Amino acid sequence: MDLQLLHYDSLESTNSEAAKLAREGASDGVCVVVDEQTAGRGRQGREWISTKGSGVYMSLILRPRVDPRGLTLIPLIAAIAVHQVLLYVLTIEADIKWPNDILVNEKKICGILCEAVDTPSGMAVVVGIGINMSAASVDNATSIQEESQTPTNRDYLVRTIFTQIDRRLGLLNGETAQIIDDWSRRSSYAFDKEVSVDLGNEVFAGTTCGLDENG
Ligand code: BTN
């Protein structure tokens, strides 16, 4: 897959723009990158604050040719990719909270929103990634600026994250156990963690015992 970066100054949401482009026929590898989002979206209908120039706001279009059951592993692949880039490029030791929040010392540095999109040429997946680059104004959040001394720039991070996602997509065809293992090694939440799960209408508590094969 070749990366094709599309830069914008301002958009409501890179995920919405990438979904629109996918419906219009954009190929996989197209990646929307923006300086600011005016209506950045998080999981479960939450807002993702996206102030100008203070974060990575990117959405990558994928057209995975895999069994639909493998699609649940794409968010895990995205989390592994970001985790790897934070460690190797910025020496930030992060943690992954299921399914794909990236935390440093329990504070969120990155969120990932993967959305399936029906398009005339088949289903696409938009992988939306938001990374705080400069001091976050949100409670319980942190940023690259606060966690690393290493200078970097946004487009370098986008390219390296893309490379890390791309090199793992092949695992969706038959080697999914490797994705689960890789995710689990990077997450303190994978095993023996006391957690509470909020399903909206129901909250329950338990101890984690690893991911099943669907992640
Ligand atoms: C979450 O943790 O709730 C997920 C946050 C995802 C934010 C990113 S920023 C780029 C892309 N565009 C969006 O509107 N959302 C994602």
Image (cartoon, rainbow, N blue to C red):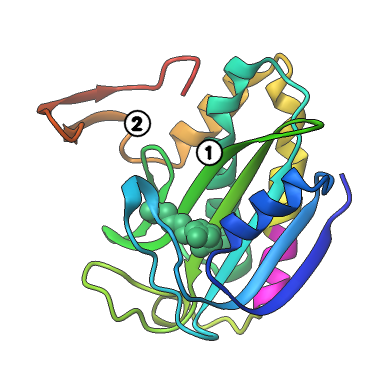
Local secondary structure at mark 2: loop
Q: Earlier in the sequence, mark 2 or mark 1?
A: 1
Q: Is residue 159 magenta?
A: yes
Q: Residue at x 65, y 76 (%)?
A: 154
Residue 182 versus residue 7 in the image, above or below: above
Q: Residue at x 26, y 58 (%)?
A: 106
Q: Is residue 153 magenta?
A: no
Relative placement, left or right, of 6 versus 112 is: right
Query: Percent x, y for residue 108?
Result: 34, 61
Which dot marks residue 75? 1
Q: Which secondary structure dominates the residues rendered in magenta?
A: helix
Q: Amino acid at mark 1?
A: Pro
Q: Residue at x 58, y 55 (%)?
A: 15
Q: Residue at x 66, y 80 (%)?
A: 153
Which residues lie in the magenta part? 154-160
Tell which of 131 and 184 is nearer to you.
Answer: 131
Q: Amino acid at mark 2?
A: Ala
Neighbour class for label 1 at 10 Å: few (<14), some, many (≥20)? many
Query: Percent x, y for residue 35?
Result: 60, 80
